[in-house]
Image (cartoon, coloured by chain):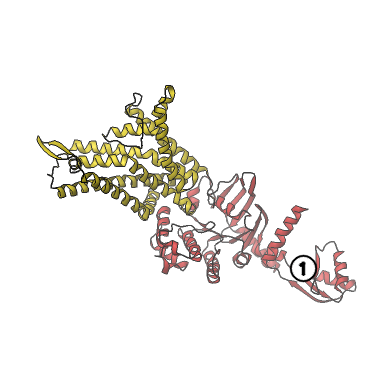
Amino acid sequence: MARLIKAEIYKLSKRSMTYILLLILIGLFALILSITEANPSIMTTETNGINTTVPAVAANIQFLQGAITSTIAMLGGFIGVVLAVVLVANGMGSEYGWNTIRPYLLCSESRSKMFASKLIADAIFVVAGMIIGVITVILLGVLFTAIRGYSWNLGASTLSFTGSQLLDFTRTFYVILPYALLAFLFTVLGRSTAAGIGFGIGASVLETIITGLLSSAHGWLAKIPDYLLSINVSKITSLSGASGGVTVYGGPNTPMVTSLHSFVVIAVYCVVFTAIAYTIFQRRDVTG
Amino acid sequence: MAAQNDKDQSSNIQKEVILRTTGLTKKFGKRTAVNNLNLEIRKGEVFGFLGPNGSGKSTTVSMIVGLIKPTAGSVNAFGMDLKDNYWPIMRKLGATIESPAFYPYLSGRDNLELFSIAIGGIPPARIMEVLERVNLADRAKDKYRQYSLGMKQRLAIAAALLRDPELIILDEPTNGLDPAGYKEVRDLIPSLAGENRTIILCSHLLHEVELVCDRVAIIKEGNIIACESMQVLLAKGQMLQIKVENPQQALAFLKSLAWIKNVTHDNGYLLVDAPKEDAERISKILAENNIFVSELSVKSSDLESVFLELTVSETNGKAN
């Protein structure tokens, strides 16, 4: 299994698509932060009993806390989901597109191990992308702090703060997961990258629209969104104090939706998507 | 020659069976692509697997390597059942299935490195070794997408050799090769067999198979219609070529003999479908009937005519 994971990492690390996605991520972060920094609103922060008045965005990005929170908001939102879906769908879809699934399976210990190694390698690259995203925002924060001449404050770098940010980081990864797995499922099902990207993003957008429509309905229909992805993703991301997911409507404050409920619903979706993809991959003949 | 045949056959019988398919069947919906296939491949032989396009060759080899799951039957290789011993079998088996397929953004060398990582336990030097073997060492660093079809075919063979396999399956390895490349691959096959490897060569190029194979199976519409040593198969296509003064009279007479399968008249010669052992008997019986033979020779057959005869007669048989 370790061999196959290594091989998958080798494939992704040698592929220009991986770096293009990373550049898009960094570019988007730079663009968004530059735009907000160009027009900062004023806010007052208190650190160690000292009040400092600085533009709001700058106040956020000059500290680790602000940097990570900003990153989580962007990663857990549409940007992170789209990039993860493209990465995952491309990784599997290319095997079908180039027919490399055939020779590669002959070099793989088993189909189940190949399947698992693909998902693990994708997860590693998504996490790596998230880490690079955080680092990018921190560096941008440092840059803007230096350019603007704001005061440096590293007061947020405590152990408890780091722990809570790690938790937020994990939550962000968790909300990206069902969309990535949905893309993986449709890539395997359609044996193409386009099917994975199309259904992965399309289904998630469609679901948010359905959620919006059903939330305005009455009776049992109104409860259906509680078991769809978007409300539950919003609930998890709201725990980080960031708005995330691909929700266009529906709220994390619906009485039925608790954190545990959202966690379980997302987990069930992940298991179901993976199980269907695995069953298809395991049983289907590989023909020319 | 008969003694030589017996010797060949007895030595084949003694050889260990390295791959056996039992009742191997694959149905795609209502269509039976491979029907109850029973094959035995012996250690060290070059086994030709012949058939027209769409006859079931690639489906069969895909079942042997686990890409396609059989509807019925089993594959046993190296004394192990494929279903329960996939990886132990695949560690000893290299294969090129249908057209070559690699990662276009990687070089030839990197593609092989990737496969060697996935397989595991392959020494790094082995990559260049196999590339040299297929004459691709000087283009090793070029991207796969820049390769010609012939180079892609050779890279596929290199990938099959990567794990130093005991059994190699080459599915149409000369497709797209120019004459020089074709010869290279044709020369490579016996040299691989000389290293105590067993080779299954799937092809519809009969000349290629005739030149390198010890034994041949012919598949048509999913059914094996012949499985013989090359010598026996070619002997089946041998004809006696006879020249007489009055061919029409001789033709009528020979056609009246029940033990002669077929006689035709072609360009002044009679072509008698009978083994060469019957030459003396035919000459004698013609002379007894005042038909005197001025020339008698054995007309050797090539695999192509045997193949066509078998596949056409099979079709005619079905039509009747």
Q: Which residue is mark 1?
A: B277
Task: Return the x and y of residue B178 as percentages of the image width and height.
Answer: 54, 69
Q: Is residue B122 above or below residue B294?
A: above
Residue A117 seen in the figure: no
Mark 1 — on which chain does it sit? B
Q: Name the tint of chain A in the rendering.
A: yellow
Task: Return the x and y of residue A147 as percentages of the image width and height.
Answer: 16, 50
Please give left or right for residue A199 compared with residue B230 in the image.
left
Please give left or right for residue A32 compared with residue A90 in the image.
left
Q: Secondary structure at mark 1?
A: helix
Q: Nearer the viewer, residue A67 or B162?
A: A67
Task: Return the x and y of residue B237 as percentages of the image width and height.
Answer: 72, 65
Task: Identify the residue at image location x=34%, y=50%.
Answer: A21
* Residue at the far left in the pictured view: A50
Q: Nearer the viewer, residue A268 or A71?
A: A71
Q: Amino acid at mark 1?
A: Glu
Chain appearing in red on the rendered image:
B
Q: Is residue B15 above or below residue A149?
A: below
* Quarter holding residue A154: top left
Task: Return the x and y of residue A243 as percentages of the image width and height.
Answer: 29, 35
